[in-house]
Image (cartoon, helix red, strand yellow):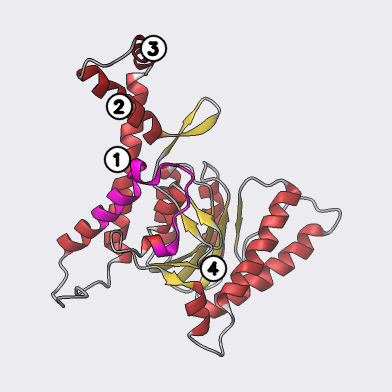
Amino acid sequence: MAADPTGLNAVVKESLDRHLGDIEKAMDRDAVAVYGPIVSGLDLGVRDAIEALDARNAKKRIAVILDTPGGSAEVVERMVDTIRSFYDDVAFVIPDKAMSAGTIFAMSGDSIHMDYFSRLGPIDPQIWKEDRFVPALSYLIQYERLLEKDRRGELTNAEFALLSKFDLAELHQFEQARALSITLLKKWLASYKFKNWTETQTKRTSVTPEMRVKRAEDIATALSDNTRWHSHGRGISRFTLESDDIKLKIDDLAAFSEADSHSTDLRTSVRKYHHCLSDYMRTVKAGIFVHSRAYF
């Protein structure tokens, strides 16, 4: 924790610890919050927070409270490997949004908990270009569009000039980023989210490993369809994720809270925690933040 002459950190930590404790009690599992863009350095915070929890006799179950605009799939992969080295069952709680690489991160969980306000996003991978992340699929789609026009003999001089400016090595990097995003999502959905899917809902037939992989592939294809979502930043609701064409089971935060009238209200605790941490991050101008009861 940084120097704190005003005592703000101590006050905020006490409040965050209290709300996080309520979430842990309601879900009967450890909890860690991961906030901010998924960039190099966030994975180090996750490692330290997870190791600190394990040193305090952690459970084998954890909730990851996630809020992120997205970022690097490579950093996501490292964080998933870290968490899975300590925990057998991972639940993701989305109080606001987990976009792009954040959606891929959430798909590594055994369960995903959202309410009507929560959003995931298209798995449009982001590549660091010059001084910012750029959506890789947008470049690939435009490049492929120009190539198709060229094949039809419809390319204008202005479009030819644009086409000649594309860097082929960079385009290959974009293609690999797209492939990595889809590969990770398929692997994790089939291994974790679908691990208890043993029988089809309608025909009651046994589910094979190949069926799990195919279902994961269908979801990856739907979430990576740039022409469907139109915008890299478009949020996808729980209801859309559970629709007939995607069919991804999402746990409702409100239903979780109502399941046991004697338990802590999970949705209320999550919102209180989210508001507190978001306000604190704005106050101290923190770009990324990781928190557990053993790490701040």
Q: Which residue is drawn at 43% across and 58% down?
A: 106
Quadrant holding the C terminus = bottom right
Q: Residue 31 carries which label?
A: 4
User: How far apart, in angstroms, are the residues tagged by discs 2 and 3?
Assistant: 14 Å
User: How far apart, in angstroms, are the residues tagged by discs 2 and 1?
Assistant: 19 Å
- In the image, residue 223 lies in the stretch drawn in magenta: yes
- Identify the element where label 4 is drawn: strand
* Left or right: where 105 falls relative to 212: right
Q: Which of marks 2 and 3 is nearer the N terminus?
A: 2
x and y percentages locating residue 170 in the rendered image: 37, 24
Q: Which of marks 2 and 1 is nearer the N terminus?
A: 2
x and y percentages locating residue 115 in the rendered image: 50, 68
x and y percentages locating residue 139 in the rendered image: 38, 29
Q: Which residue does the numbered mark 2 point to in the structure image?
A: 145
Report the amino acid beneath label 1.
Ala
User: How far apart, in angstroms, are the residues tagged by discs 3 and 1?
Assistant: 30 Å
Report the amino acid beneath label 4.
Ala
Q: Which mark is residue 158?
A: 3
Q: Earlier in the sequence, mark 2 or mark 4?
A: 4
Q: Which of marks 3 and 4 is nearer the N terminus?
A: 4
Q: Earlier in the sequence, mark 3 or mark 1?
A: 3
Q: Earlier in the sequence, mark 1 or mark 4?
A: 4
x and y percentages locating residue 33 in the rendered image: 57, 60
Report the amino acid beneath label 3.
Ala
Q: Which residue is drawn at 40% across and 48% down?
A: 122
Question: What segment carries the magenta color?
Answer: 216-239
Report the amino acid beneath label 2.
Arg
User: How far apart, in angstroms, are the residues tagged by discs 2 and 4?
Assistant: 45 Å
Q: Which residue is drawn at 62% across and 67% down?
A: 271
